[in-house]
Image: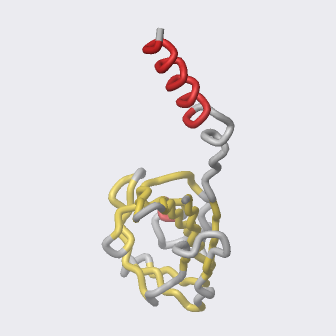
Amino acid sequence: MQKALGLALFLSLFAITACGPESSSYTPTRDTISTTASISIDGNGRMIHITEKGATVQSDKIEECSIGFDKEDLSYAIVSGEEIQLDSQTLDFVRPLSSPVNSSVDARLFAVWKIPSQTVGQVSYNIEIEIQADKIIYSNTCIR
């Protein structure tokens, strides 16, 4: 009887601490920040030239979350319809964008691309890059 009472007390304490209202109330903090730069694209040299940088943006919710432009020129190579190399980073295709008419640039470049999600410490980073004819947009969704 004493063992049964001890087990029942343990189970009820377990239910209060592990299954109570406190255990399911955690909501991850999520923030999406973006910055835009004006660009020109050299289709023959396969370069994206940043002509006017947007400001580096810092999340006001997650201290480790920021995004900005650190280079003036980005080389690119279209690996397939599903993948490009932007400088040394491999990006995966998300969705197409309309491409300019009579452009010397491969129309597949004009799309939204993403870097595979990365987690550093307790923060996950999900970066998307939108390449348009005259601008590039970096978006970073951070989750902690």
Which of the 4 image quarters holds residue 87?
bottom left
Q: Which one is in front, 132 or 12? A: 12
In this picture the colour scheme is: secondary structure
Residue 35 visible in image: yes
Task: Please name whichever residue, 138 or 82, is drawn nearer the observer in this view of the structure.
Answer: 138
Q: Is residue 134 visible?
A: no
Question: Which image quadrant for residue 84?
Answer: bottom left
Left or right: 47 in relation to 88? right
Left or right: where 113 falls relative to 90: right
- Give the residue at x 47% y 8%: 1
Residue, far top:
1
Determine the residue positioned at 38% across, 56% down: 83
Q: Looking at the picture, how far across and down is residue 46, in whole percent?
A: 38, 77
Look at 44% across and 87% down and name the residue there: 71
Quarter-of-image position of residue 136: bottom right
Q: Quadrant of the C terminus?
A: bottom right
At a point 59% along the width and 72% down the height, the residue shown is 137
Above-or-below relation of 23 to 90: above
Q: How many marks?
A: 0
The answer to whether residue 80 is above or below residue 130 is above
Give residue 141's position: percent from left, percent from top: 58, 62
Q: Is residue 117 above or below residue 106?
A: above
Would you place residue 56 above or below residue 28 in this image? below
Where in the figure is residue 96, as x and y percent of width and height?
57, 54
Between 138 and 13, the one lying in front of the other is 13
Q: Is residue 111 left or right of residue 121?
A: right
Residue 134 x, y percent position in the rendering: 62, 78
- Observer-nearest of 39 and 138: 138
